[in-house]
């Protein structure tokens, strides 16, 4: 049963007939137009001099004012037989105004008329919802518009819209109620790995969604509702899990739980020497998940990747300048979790800075970490020097010979340079 919309009560005196009409005595709703502004029309209909009245008047903004009690007979139709069996509703407006009537007026009037239609069992059709222009003239057989031949509500009143609204408000659809709960969830529950969720529902549930921390992660469109939820895609700790059941016409029910995810952490371990030269081998050792791939970054730029165990990388440090560099290994598992390890390495590749032969002594200056210097004459190692200063008495005439200095560093890294003639 619809509720009567709110009304303001401004009772008039002397321009209506007091009666005690029961609800079933009302058989018609008569639609009128004021042909004037809202408040002046109210004052006129309250006045005894008007010799006219209406049960209600509705403003263009949808405000409803009641002037005559529904059990009394208002003088609104110009036909006493219709007056005795009807409710008169005035609407602020002008019959000839092409602007017509506002949506707020239609809605307010339809809600009021729908309440009468249900309480008085009035059929919602044009035989029982009539305009003043449809009222028979009691003094002129065949004429309409009441005793004064009124033409309201006129051509700009939409009977189709009005009656659709009356039916909508008179017979609103019954609200759809659905419920949802998770029998195997509770606040504070520890969950890990692949968790099987189940939803217990009532009502016409069309789908159930699993919402994790505000984001829809899973949905099931067929009862019995349930499935597998992979918790390893979340960080360990507290999370909010919602089961949302959706029914027809926007019906929804939510069951909310605070759970604790506690999975074995996904960890990447790796090590590298503080100083490096030549080829450096790095291995990513991973625990706590099934790794999808491992990436290698050098100073923030991706330089290599590996998709299979044992995730070993050979990095040629000779391709970068000597000095401090940052290596980073980043791993991703099949659930989207990531693990990383940053390693700071100082590259100390050996290099020949300069070399000279003076006064029969071959002297070599080096850079980087050098373990030994080898001196080659015509491709043959003639001297191996293991401590600076790297100098060797040259006991032969260098003219016409090829002299090469070779610096050997960490990991067997080698740098060679010929002696300029």
Image (spheres, grey):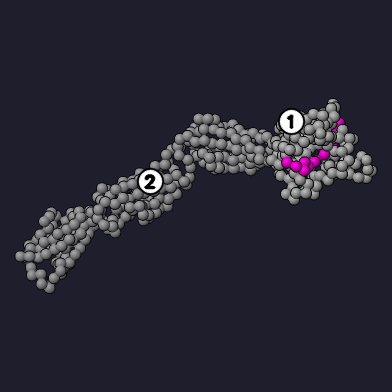
Q: Which mark is residue 340?
A: 2
Residue drawn at (48%, 42%), measured in percent from left and top?
Answer: 233
Residue at which label 1 appears: 10
Is residue 26 one of those drawn in magenta? yes
Going from N to C along the chain, the mark reached first, 2 or 1, is 1
Residue drawn at (58%, 37%), measured in percent from left and top?
Answer: 243
Return the x and y of residue 318 as percentages of the image width and height. 27, 58
Question: Which of the image's four quarters has the C terminus?
Answer: bottom left
Question: Which of the image's four quarters has the N terminus?
Answer: top right
Is residue 182 one of those drawn in magenta? no
- Say whether residue 346 is left or right of residue 258: left
Residue drawn at (61%, 42%), measured in percent from left and top?
Answer: 220
Return the x and y of residue 142 as percentages of the image width and height. 93, 45
Q: How many marks?
A: 2
Q: Is residue 11 visible?
A: yes
Residue drawn at (74%, 30%), measured in percent from left and top?
Answer: 10
- Say whether residue 158 is left or right of residue 403: right
């Amino acid at each position: 049963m619809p509720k009567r919309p709110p009304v303001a009560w401004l009772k008039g005196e002397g321009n209506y007939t007091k009666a005690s009409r029961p609800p079933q005595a009302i058989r018609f709703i008569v639609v009128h137009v004021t042909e004037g502004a809202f408040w002046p029309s109210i004052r006129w209909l309250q006045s005894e001099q008007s010799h006219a009245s209406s049960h209600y008047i509705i403003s263009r903004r949808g405000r409803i004012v009641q002037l005559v009690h529904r059990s009394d007979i208002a003088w609104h139709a110009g036909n006493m037989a219709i007056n005795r069996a009807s409710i008169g509703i005035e609407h602020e407006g002008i019959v000839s105004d092409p602007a017509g009537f506002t949506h707020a007026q239609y809605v307010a009037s339809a809600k009021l008329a729908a309440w009468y239609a249900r309480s008085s069992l009035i059929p919602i059709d044009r035989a029982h919802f009539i305009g003043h222009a449809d009222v028979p003239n009691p003094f002129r057989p065949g004429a309409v518009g009441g005793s004064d031949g009124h033409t309201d509500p006129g051509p700009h009143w939409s009977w189709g819209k009005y009656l659709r609204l009356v039916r909508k408000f008179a017979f609103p659809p019954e609200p759809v109620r659905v419920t949802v709960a998770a029998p195997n969830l509770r606040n504070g529950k520890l969950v890990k790995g692949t968790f099987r969720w189940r939803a217990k529902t009532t009502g016409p549930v069309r789908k159930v969604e699993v919402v994790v921390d505000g984001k829809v992660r899973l949905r099931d469109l067929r009862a019995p509702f349930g499935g597998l939820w992979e918790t390893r895609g979340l960080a360990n700790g507290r999370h909010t899990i919602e089961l949302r059941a959706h029914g027809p016409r926007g019906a929804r029910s939510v069951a909310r739980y605070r759970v604790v995810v506690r999975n074995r952490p996904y960890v990447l371990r790796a090590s590298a020497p503080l100083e490096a030269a030549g080829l450096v081998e790095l291995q990513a050792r991973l625990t706590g998940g099934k790794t999808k791939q491992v990436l290698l970054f050098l100073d923030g730029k991706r330089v290599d990747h590996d998709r299979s165990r044992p995730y070993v990388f050979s990095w040629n440090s000779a391709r970068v300048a000597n000095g401090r560099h940052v290596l980073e290994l980043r791993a991703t598992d099949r659930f989207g979790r990531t693990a990383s390890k940053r390693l700071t390495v100082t590259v100390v590749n050996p290099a020949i800075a300069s070399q000279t032969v003076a006064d029969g002594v071959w002297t070599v200056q080096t850079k980087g970490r050098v373990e030994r210097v080898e001196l080659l004459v015509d491709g043959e190692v003639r001297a191996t020097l293991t401590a600076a200063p790297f100098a060797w008495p040259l006991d032969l005439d260098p003219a016409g010979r090829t002299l090469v200095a070779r610096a050997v560093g960490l990991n067997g890294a080698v740098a060679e340079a010929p002696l300029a003639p």
